[in-house]
Image (spheres, grey):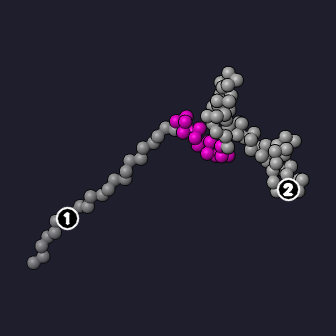
Amino acid sequence: MATKRKATTTKRRTPAKTTTRKTTTSARKATSTRRSKEMLLVGSKTKEALKSHKLNVSGDALEGINQWVYWLIDQAACRAKANGRKTVRAHDFMA
């Protein structure tokens, strides 16, 4: 004689709740900084030099100086190549 089986239900897992975070201003700044070029300057030293002239330093000042330094490097590299050298010298930055 066949016995009747009791229907069993399997417990299904519910998907984990995803939390949505608001993006903070500092998180947005960090994201935009990652997209730009690597920082070549020491931030604290640069700010200290600017503050020695009794000036305030805005949040984007270091990024602006960093972009200018990259431009100087590009110009010096072009000048060295134009002169047939593989070595960048101090006077390449002054021209």
Residue in the image at 85% along x and 56% along y: 85
For the question of whether residue 60 can be seen, the reply is no
Residue in the image at 68% along x and 28% along y: 50
Provide residue 58's location: percent of width, then percent of height: 65, 28
Frontmost residue, 21 versus 37: 37
Provide residue 36's location: percent of width, then percent of height: 66, 44
Q: Which residues are magenta?
A: 24-39
- Image quarter of the C terminus: top right
Q: Residue furthest top?
A: 54
Instruction: Describe residue 71's horizontal placement relative to residue 43 as left or right.
Output: right
| Residue kind at label 1, given as amino acid type | Ala
Residue 85 image label: 2
Residue 7 image label: 1
Is residue 29 shown in magenta? yes
Provide residue 75's location: percent of width, then percent of height: 82, 46
Label 2 packing within 10 angstroms: few (<14), some (14-19), many (20+): few
From the image, give the main secondary structure of the stretch colored magenta.
Answer: helix
Provide residue 35's location: percent of width, then percent of height: 64, 46
Label 1 packing within 10 angstroms: few (<14), some (14-19), many (20+): few
Find residue 91 and report its image quarter: top right
Instruction: Describe residue 34's horizontal placement relative to residue 12 as left or right.
Output: right
Frontmost residue, 37 versus 51: 51
Of the numbered discs 2 and 1, the one sitting upstream in the chain is: 1
Q: Which of label 2 and label 1 is nearer to you?
A: 2
Q: Is residue 18 above or below residue 50?
A: below
| Residue kind at label 2, given as amino acid type | Arg
Residue in the image at 26% along x and 61% along y: 10
Q: Is residue 59 above or below residue 94?
A: above
Is residue 64 shown in magenta? no
